[in-house]
Amino acid sequence: MADAAMGKSTAGDAVAGMLTDALNSFNPFGGSGIKQGIGSVFAAFVPTMARPFAELALNQNWMGRPIYPESFGKQEKADAYNYFTGTSEVYTNLAQVLNEGTGGDMFESGVIDMSPNTMQYLVGYYLSGAGRTVDRLVTMATSEERIETADVPMLRSFVGDAANDTRSLSERYNAISAKAMPDVLRAEAVRDPAVPREVREGIMERGIDLTNLEIGKTVTEADKALRKINKALKTATPEQRERLLDVRQRAMKVVIRENNRLTPD
């Protein structure tokens, strides 16, 4: 109500926001998790088994993110050819076979025409955990990249992979940073004429670990990249988020490899 009074949102948005909060507190039509907006409020009144079709009509999942990309411009493709980058070939091929087999092509819909992302969404929704397992197996079977332990359903629950575990990487990265960065700061202080001479002389007397200084340069560059990635994650789509998390892991691995190279013991 305050946002509407100050002109930050419309009266309709304010009403939708209040309805959203009320439905999240008590929603007999399928639980909480309703997001802001008229569309999400509408979808909340649809019974659970039919809700995917309401969300598909709105092109908005329970997180408020698009389920499939929408075509723009005059040269629109059939839905079967409209999908997010990184979608498994099994879904894209199946969607295109169904479209073409029922009289369609790239530019005209057949009797059965749906986006591969729609197909993937329905599998995940109706089969729940089993659907996600099927989706992971499909992705793994069609991927040309090296299969890691964390990619294999069931096995990933019993076998850890420290080299690719986010928590392990973060802990290792933070430990390396904590060890190396003090020498980087000491080196910067020595070069800074604003730092009192006695402080600089004390640093020089103590000495600076050149190995830590070299590692610290890599940490500094990685920190810049990680800040940009963390900022981008706040507004990323699911597909963008997956790629950003992969880049974040690679940035930390660069530091870890540099540390291992310079401190082999």
Image (spheres, rainbow, N blue to C red):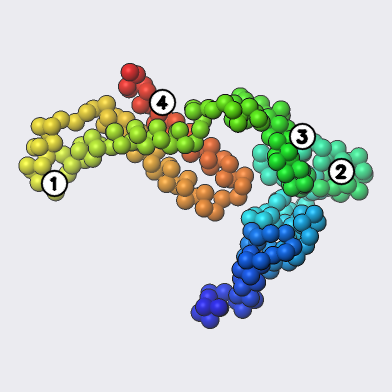
Sequence order check: which comes first, mark 1 or mark 2? 2
Q: Quadrant location of residue 156?
A: top right
Query: Quick one: SS at disc 1?
Result: loop
The spot of residue 243 in percent (x, y) is: 57, 40
Residue on which disc 2 sits? 99
Mark earlier in primary sequence (4, 3): 3
Q: Secondary structure at mark 3?
A: helix
From the viewer's perspective, is residue 112 above or below residue 4?
above
Indicate left or right for 171 with 77 as reference: left
Numbered disc 4: secondary structure: helix
Query: Which quadrant, please, contains the C terminus?
Result: top left
Q: CA distance from mark 2 to mark 4?
A: 48 Å
Three-letter code, disc 3: Val
On the image, numbered disc 1 is attached to which residue? 195
Q: Which residue is mark 4?
A: 257
Q: CA distance from mark 1 to mark 2?
A: 71 Å
Residue at the spot of label 3: 90
Q: Secondary structure at mark 2?
A: helix
Coordinates of residue 197 in the picture (x, y in percent): 8, 43
Query: Between 156 and 251, which is closer to the camera in this rendering?
Result: 156
